[in-house]
Amino acid sequence: MASEEERKKAELVRQFGSDWVLRVETREIARKNKQWYELLWPRQYEVKTMYLWIKINWLPHANQNIPFPIDHDNLPKNSGKPVTYALLGGWTIPKRDLNLLTKGPLYNENWELLVPERTNAWKTALNRILGIAGVIIAISGVAWGVYWLFNP
């Protein structure tokens, strides 16, 4: 019987799979195209969840000539240091999707930091506000236009 922690981990991995996709032909790990309303408040995931999802869904027999996308430094959980993850083999994550990953560190092949160890909560909130700002401005414009159309 699975523990509560294992069930939560499995659910997070399942949710990650419903939101993200591995594009083997372009070596890209990206967020799936979503409905407009899902873009307003997208789910954020830890880098560890992404790693587990890739590990579970990687088909080595189908991807023989393509390197595994991500690796980590194998630090034990009780070391007190965060596990460092790195993309390998030319794999990338679009910049727009990096904002949806938290709790790195995640580096690219050139050891450039993509996702910091700790994600600034203010930055996350600001990104979400900016994400819905366009929708708010559009709705305000339509409301203003309708008001002036019917109240000349």
Image (tube, grey):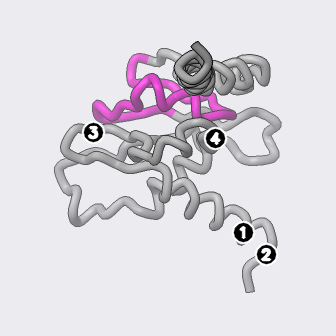
Amino acid type at circle 3 is: Arg
Give the Cα separation between the discs numbered 1 and 2: 5 Å
Q: Residues within 10 Å of mark 3 (few under 14, many from 20)?
A: some
Helix, strand or loop under label 4: loop
Q: Residues within 10 Å of mark 1 (few under 14, many from 20)?
A: few
Q: Nearer the viewer, residue 115 or 147?
A: 147
Tag 1–tag 2 contact (CB < 8 Å): yes
Please report the residue visible at 66 percent of the width from the left and 27 percent of the height from the top: 128
Q: Which mark is residue 3?
A: 2
Helix, strand or loop under label 1: helix
Q: Is residue 23 left or right of residue 14?
A: left
Tag 3–tag 2 contact (CB < 8 Å): no
Q: Residues within 10 Å of mark 4 (few under 14, many from 20)?
A: some
Tag 3–tag 1 contact (CB < 8 Å): no
- In x, y percent, where is residue 21? 38, 50
Instruction: Quickly name the residue at label 4.
Output: 44
User: Along the polypeptide, which appears first: circle 3 or circle 2?
Assistant: 2
Give the Cα separation between the discs numbered 4 and 1: 19 Å
Q: Which mark is residue 6?
A: 1
Q: Which mark is residue 27?
A: 3
- Whether 97 is among the magenta residues is yes
Please report the residue visible at 62 percent of the width from the left and 18 percent of the height from the top: 151
Amino acid type at circle 4 is: Gln
Range of residues picked out in magenta: 86-110
Please report the residue visible at 57 percent of the width from the left and 13 percent of the height from the top: 152
Q: Which is more foreground, mark 2 or mark 4?
A: 4
Q: Which is more foreground, mark 4 or mark 1?
A: 4
Decide whether the magenta segment is chiefly helix, strand or loop.
loop
Amino acid type at circle 1 is: Glu
